Image: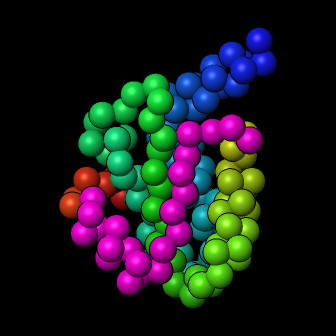
Amino acid sequence: MRSLDTAWERANILNDWRKWSVKIREAADETLSSDLLDVYVFGSVATGRLVASSDVDILIVAKNLPKSVIRRTDIKERIIGKAGLPLIHPFEIHLADEDEAKIYFKHIRGNFIKL
C-alpha cells in the first residue's frame, strides 16, 4: 500500500508541476540570491508530451556555481528542501553556469518555459 501512496503523491505533484516549479524557483532565489540568473522548465512538460512516467526537468542558471559535483548536489538538496518537495518527486533539477546553459539551449532548441 505504501508504494501506491507514493505513486499517487508523485502523480499529484506531476499534475501540479506549475505550482511546484514556482516553489522551486522561489527556493532557488532564496538559496542562490544574486547569483541566480534564470530558471527554466524543459523536456516533456515544455513540449506538451507529459505522461504519468515523465519527470519535470528544471534548469537553474546561476553565476559562481561550484565546479564540484558534491557541492552542486548540496545546492540542489537545499533548493528541494526549501521548496518543500517530498523525498519521492518527479523533478530533475539541473544546475548550470552561463556557459553550461548554452549547451542545454543548443539541445532543447527553444522548447523551454521561462519561470
Q: Nearer the viewer, residue 81 or 88?
A: 88
Q: Residue at x 78, y 18 (%)?
A: 2
User: Residue 9: in sight, yes or no?
Assistant: yes
User: Residue 31: in sight, yes or no?
Assistant: no
Q: Residue at x 60, y 50 (%)?
A: 23
**Residue at the extreme bottom of the image, as rendered:** 64
Q: Say whether residue 82 is left or right of residue 43.
A: right
Q: Which residues are magenta?
A: 87-108
**Can you say whether 72 is above or below 64 in the image?**
above
Q: How far from the left and from the top, in percent, is residue 98?
A: 41, 82
**Can you say whether 36 is above or below 57 in the image?**
below
Q: Quadrant of the N terminus?
A: top right
**Residue at the extreme left of the image, as rendered:** 109
Q: Quadrant of residue 90?
A: top right
Q: Quadrant of the C terminus?
A: bottom left
**Residue at the extreme top of the image, as rendered:** 1
